[in-house]
């Protein structure tokens, strides 16, 4: 059954987030041969439309308004609903990001439809559209079939491969007018926690430190390894609670969920709440001086040793490979 699917293009600091392209790929599956329409909301975002088309969107609709210059669920839900009213979609896909997690339930309730949140895969099987999503903190996966209503899903970053960028692809980028009423919340300023380098939730390589790093300075060797591998720094709650790093780096049940190609856990015991945020990483390397540490149960490669000896050795070896 061919469907019209809206996919939200997520913009941060003037650029499209990768998860937008992954959502387009998921949207193509949901569309089953129908049309994928990317949606851009913001102030001055029109120019990003072509990139969404190069990643597979059939066309792009844009709502531009200065009230959308900063994300607010109030403003973005009004703008997105204006697009829904004009496009009448059969399906909607967002990234399962902080923005997607905030906005999607609001839109789903307005549409009186269900929401499949945090999907890691979508496929057509046996004539049905089947979504896969983790349950019990990632210990199991459930398959969901949607049969009626507007099909609405959020997709976990780094799980669904984007389509290859085709720079020769062209398509229509048009504007939708939305009357955005006065916002109940005005964001005057966004003060970002200083985070260096790669965005943790979309990183292909994550080097995470736990209480075993022993101090804020103990993260330095991890940062050097992350620099060499082009990765991001993450942490266990143990490390955050001990004030070795900021809570924005926390990975786990009450932190960020990451699915990088490579996750290197340094001095992390592997509590269930931590595993909930990283156990679906493609390759897991654990460095811990306790051979009985739980983290080794989910690790593809385990190194029993002192992280302050092992991590610098790895950094040196990776540097040699890069030369
Ligand atoms: P520890 O358990 O203390 O482990 C430190 C590890 O470092 C040990 O295994 C030790 O052998 C090793 N080590 C020490 N020195 C070295 C060295 N020099 N070299 C190598 N290894 C060394 N935790 C999260 O991470 N994320 C969450 O989102 C989260 N949410 C939670 C929610 C709730 C409701 C609760 C109750 C807990 C939550 N926790 C979460 C906390 C979780 O239960 C653990 O307490 C926490 O993950 C432990 O952090 P850790 O592994 O860094 O510390």
Image (spheres, rainbow, N blue to C red):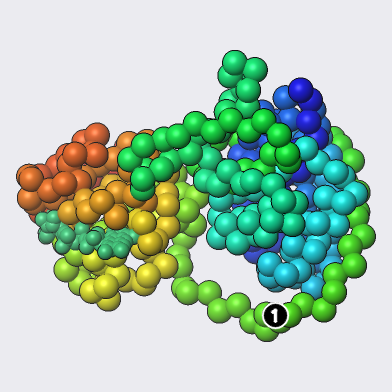
Q: Residue at x 61, y 39 (%)?
A: 22
Is residue 159 positioned above or below 224 on the image? above
Assign the N terminus to one quadrant of the image.
Answer: top right
Binning the other alpha carbons within 10 Å of mark 1 as few (below 14), some (14 to 19) or many (20 upward) gives: few
Is residue 290 positioned above or below 301 on the image? below
Q: Residue furthest top?
A: 126
Instruction: Classify residue 7 as left or right of residue 270.
Output: right
Residue identified by numbered label 1: 185
Dot 1: element? loop
**Observer-nearest residue: 237 or 144?**
144
Dividing the picture into quarters, in which one does residue 213 lie? bottom left
Residue 286, image x, y percentages: 21, 45
Instruction: Classify residue 273 as left or right of residue 166.
Output: left
Q: Residue at x 82, y 72 (%)?
A: 66
Residue 274, image x, y percentages: 29, 54
Residue 171, image x, y percentages: 86, 37
Split into quadrants, the picture shows ligand 1 in the one at bottom left
Residue 220 visible? The answer is no
**Observer-nearest residue: 81 or 206?**
81
Instruction: Classify residue 95 as left or right of residue 50.
Output: left
């Amino acid at each position: 059954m061919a469907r019209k699917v809206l996919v939200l293009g997520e913009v941060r600091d003037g650029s499209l987030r990768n998860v937008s392209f992954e959502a387009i790929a998921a949207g193509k599956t949901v569309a089953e041969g129908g049309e994928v329409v990317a949606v851009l909301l913001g102030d001055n975002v029109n120019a990003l439309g072509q990139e969404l088309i190069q990643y597979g969107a059939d066309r792009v609709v844009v709502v531009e308004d200065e009230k959308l210059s900063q994300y607010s669920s109030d403003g973005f839900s009004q703008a997105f609903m204006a697009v829904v009213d004009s496009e009448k979609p059969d399906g909607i896909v967002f990234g399962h990001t902080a923005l997607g997690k905030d906005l999607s339930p609001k839109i789903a309730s307005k549409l009186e439809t269900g929401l499949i949140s945090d999907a890691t895969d979508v496929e057509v099987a046996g004539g049905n559209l089947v979504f896969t999503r983790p349950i019990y903190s990632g210990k199991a996966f459930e398959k969901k079939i949607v049969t009626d209503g507007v099909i609405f899903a959020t997709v976990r970053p780094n799980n669904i491969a984007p389509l290859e960028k085709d720079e020769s692809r062209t398509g229509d980028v048009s504007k939708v007018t939305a009357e955005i009423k006065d916002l109940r919340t005005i964001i005057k300023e966004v003060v970002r926690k200083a985070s260096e380098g790669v965005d943790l939730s979309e990183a292909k390589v994550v080097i995470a430190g736990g209480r075993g790093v022993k101090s804020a300075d103990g993260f330095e060797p991890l940062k050097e390894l992350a620099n060499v591998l082009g990765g991001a720094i993450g942490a266990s709650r143990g490390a955050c609670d001990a004030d070795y790093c900021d809570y924005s780096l926390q990975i786990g049940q009450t932190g960020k969920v990451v699915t990088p190609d490579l996750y290197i856990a340094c001095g992390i015991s592997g509590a269930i709440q931590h595993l909930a945020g990283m156990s679906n990483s493609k390759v897991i390397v654990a460095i811990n001086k306790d051979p009985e540490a739980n983290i080794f149960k989910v690790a593809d490669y385990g190194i029993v040793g002192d992280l302050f000896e092992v991590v610098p050795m790895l950094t040196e070896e990776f540097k040699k490979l890069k030369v």
